[in-house]
């Protein structure tokens, strides 16, 4: 390297043996980063990026080359300023495919390059003068300064690089010409009737394929839209089924406690009637007593012989206050009984909700749930619950009661057949798409009723 700053190509200098290259201080002048990027224009479109990079690498250490496809220009970035200067000096203005290559930096970059060159030349002269004065008698130092200026140093191998660039450009022109000729022959072939016919066939085939593809896509989209609509309908039906099942639970709660509520109401009504009757009777007795007190005593008559036959006095009502207290206690007991019944209803409703929450919602898990068939038979659920439920569902799905259909399902349940078998052999023949949901609802109801019985709840 040179005594005061590092530069590429030092291996070409005649440095005597024994001279320590790191003895001399390095240059403190910074290379501006923005000045290392160059714009290159008038490139043939047929020229590949690899060929352009080959040209640029001859100028120095290339960092990157960017060029959009099919464009006659691009951007190059170099590692150091010497490579930038070589590219500007040698590649700019060279003829490629009958066009001059344009290599330049931006306006700001050019100012940075000029400033950097000025500083380098000044530094070169100052340090060269200093070393010559100090070590001018030493042969090995004089060999380092065979270049009289910095400009002479950085252009030392321009001729050699220029010849290489000219050789590469000559080869590239042949490649570009060949590519152009190939394209021209291809275009000429297309102008031939046979080629036009082939192109027309290709075009028609492509158009036919595109038409079929569009038809298939339209058909597929139509089917997907239908599936989506069906999924939405099924979701709505599922919501309706859940609502109906909730109503069924509420109906069961109402059914289980209806008789008890009626009985409590009758008892309470009778107690009130008796209480009002007693109050009325007591009021009448009180009024009579008050009336007797307000009447004037009769005037005395002359004494006469009167035969008095004493009759036993009428019994007056006794313990009236005690009776009222008993009546009040009976009413309080009736109200307490009613509150207890209402609390039992609330507890029952909560327990039924808990049972319902344990029933699986997924089809596979639901159908694989174990059924207590022994309890199923003993409780007579088929007639008490399932047959009425099937009648209601037939009216819901078919608008009428189908006894043959109901009897067929009852028979399958009596034989303890699996739900999927009931779907395939009975329900699907009548309800088709709704068959699966029908059996799912029925199976949930069966599990629900059995779990009620297992917990000792009235069904």
Image (cartoon, helix red, strand yellow):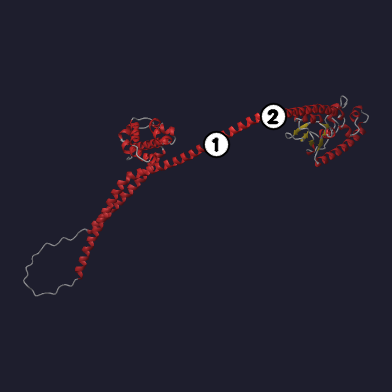
Q: Is residue 117 visible?
A: yes
* Quadrant housing residue 40: top right
Q: Position of residue 358 (x, y in %)?
A: 41, 37
Closer mark to the observer between disc 1 and disc 2:
2
Badge 1 density bin: few <14, some 14–19, many ≥20, Cα 10 Å = few
Image quadrant holding the C terminus, namely top left
Depth check: give the residue in front, 129 or 260.
260
* In the rendered image, the vertical position of residue 272 relative to residue 135, given as above or below: below
| Image height of 392 relative to 162, above or below | below
| Residue underneath mark 1 | 221
Residue 429 in the image: x percent, y percent?
39, 33
Residue visible at 68% across and 28% down?
197
Q: Name the spot of residue 114 as percent of width and height, x first.
A: 85, 39
In the visual, does 281 lie left or right of 244? Answer: left
Please tell me how crowded label 2 is: few (under 14), some (14-19), or many (20+) other residues with Cα within 10 Å: few
**Residue that label 2 marks:** 196
Instruction: Please tell me the numbered disc located at residue 140.
Output: none
Mark 1 in CB contact with mark 2 (< 8 angstroms): no
* Image quarter hosting the N terminus: top right
Could you say which is closer to the camera, residue 43 or residue 34? Answer: 43
User: Mark 1 vs mark 2: which is more N-terminal?
Assistant: 2
Asked which secondary structure carries label 1, the reply is: helix
Residue 455 seen in the figure: no
User: Is residue 187 rendered to the left or right of residue 376?
Assistant: right
User: Picture coordinates of residue 212 (x, y %)?
Assistant: 58, 32
């Amino acid at each position: 390297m040179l005594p005061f700053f590092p530069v590429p190509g030092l291996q070409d200098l005649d440095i005597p043996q024994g001279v320590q290259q790191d003895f001399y201080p390095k240059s403190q002048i910074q290379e501006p980063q923005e000045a290392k990027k160059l714009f290159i224009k008038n490139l043939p479109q047929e020229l590949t990026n690899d060929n352009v990079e080959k040209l640029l690498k001859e100028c120095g250490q290339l960092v990157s080359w960017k060029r959009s496809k099919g464009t006659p220009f691009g951007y190059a970035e170099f590692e150091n300023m010497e490579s930038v200067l070589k590219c500007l000096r040698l590649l700019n203005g060279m003829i490629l495919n009958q066009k001059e290559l344009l290599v330049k930096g931006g306006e700001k970059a050019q100012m940075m390059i000029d400033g950097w060159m000025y500083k380098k030349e000044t530094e070169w002269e100052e340090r060269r003068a200093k070393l010559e004065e100090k070590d001018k008698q030493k042969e090995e130092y004089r060999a380092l300064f065979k270049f009289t200026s910095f400009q002479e140093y950085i252009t030392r191998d321009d001729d050699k690089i220029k010849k290489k660039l000219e050789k590469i450009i000559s080869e590239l022109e042949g490649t570009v010409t060949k590519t152009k000729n190939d394209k021209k022959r291809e275009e000429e072939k297309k102008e031939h009737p046979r080629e036009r016919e082939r192109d027309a066939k290709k075009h028609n085939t492509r158009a036919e394929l595109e038409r079929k593809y569009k038809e298939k896509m339209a058909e597929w989209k139509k089917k997907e839209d239908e599936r989506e609509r069906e999924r939405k309908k099924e979701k709505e039906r599922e919501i309706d089924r859940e609502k109906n099942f909730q109503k069924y639970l509420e109906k069961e709660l109402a059914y289980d406690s209806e008789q008890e509520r009626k009985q409590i109401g009758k008892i309470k009504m009778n107690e009130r009637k008796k209480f009002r009757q007693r109050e009325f009777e007591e009021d009448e007795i009180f009024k009579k007593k008050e009336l007797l007190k307000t009447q004037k005593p009769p005037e005395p008559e002359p004494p006469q012989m009167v035969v008095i036959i004493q009759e036993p006095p009428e019994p007056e009502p006794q313990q009236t206050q005690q009776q009222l207290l008993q009546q009040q206690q009976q009413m309080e007991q009736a109200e307490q009984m009613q509150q207890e019944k209402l609390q039992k209803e609330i507890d029952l409703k909560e327990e039924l909700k808990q049972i319902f929450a344990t029933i699986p919602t997924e089809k596979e898990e639901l159908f694989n749930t174990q059924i207590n068939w022994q309890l199923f038979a003993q409780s007579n659920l088929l007639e008490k619950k399932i047959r009425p439920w099937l009648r209601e569902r037939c009216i819901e799905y078919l608008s009428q009661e189908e006894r043959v259909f109901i009897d067929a399902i009852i028979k399958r349940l009596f034989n303890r057949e699996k739900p999927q078998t009931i779907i395939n052999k009975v329900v699907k023949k009548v309800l088709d798409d709704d068959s699966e949901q029908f059996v799912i609802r029925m199976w949930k109801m069966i599990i629900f009723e059995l779990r009620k019985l297992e917990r000792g709840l009235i069904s």
